[in-house]
Image: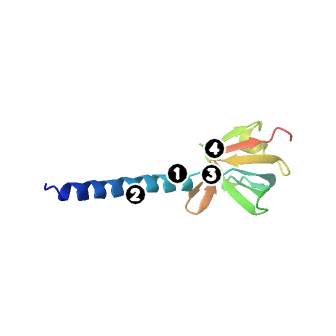
Amino acid sequence: MTKTEKPIARWIGAIGAAALLAGGVAATAQAAPVEHDGAVLSKESDGKRSFRIRDDESGRKLRFRVNARTQFERIPGGFRGLERGMVISVDGVRRDNGRLVARFVERERNN
């Protein structure tokens, strides 16, 4: 490597490192956990195991599915214990084939 090639190689390396760092920050920002709080509107248990809430922040109605990995806190009976009007927090939400799947469902303490 010649004297003129060394600074260029360092410059390219610095740009590459900056791009990787920026990409990592963007990926982290996109993966930021979202929590949805709201009252349970309905529950569908026959095969679909899903429930709907009205999100307190956005006012939107959201449907969440639960599976064997979904964990319930302060809800006796887990999914069976969900009742209409119960105020809950849904966390660890991910998309699976366009559907929202809840990882954690927790009853609010003041409810």
Q: Which mark is residue 108?
A: none
Indicate the amino acid at tag 4. Answer: Thr
Q: Is the C-beta separation of discs 4 and 1 under 8 Å?
A: no
Marks 2 and 4 close (CB-CB < 8 Å): no
Q: Residues within 10 Å of mark 1 (few under 14, many from 20)?
A: few
Give whichever of discs 2 and 1 has the lower sequence position: 2
Give the label, 4 or 1, closer to the camera.
1
Q: Which corner quadrant holds the N terminus?
A: bottom left
Which of 84 and 30 lies nearest the eye of the viewer? 30
User: How is the structure coloured here?
Assistant: rainbow
Of the two numbered discs 2 and 4 on the same chain, state the one appearing first in sequence: 2
- The outermost residue toward the left is 2
Give the mark, 3 or 4, whose residue is nearer the N terminus: 4
- Distance, label 2 to label 3, CA atoms, is 29 Å
Q: Quadrant of residue 65?
A: bottom right
User: How far across and down, in percent of the image, does residue 78 sit?
Assistant: 72, 40
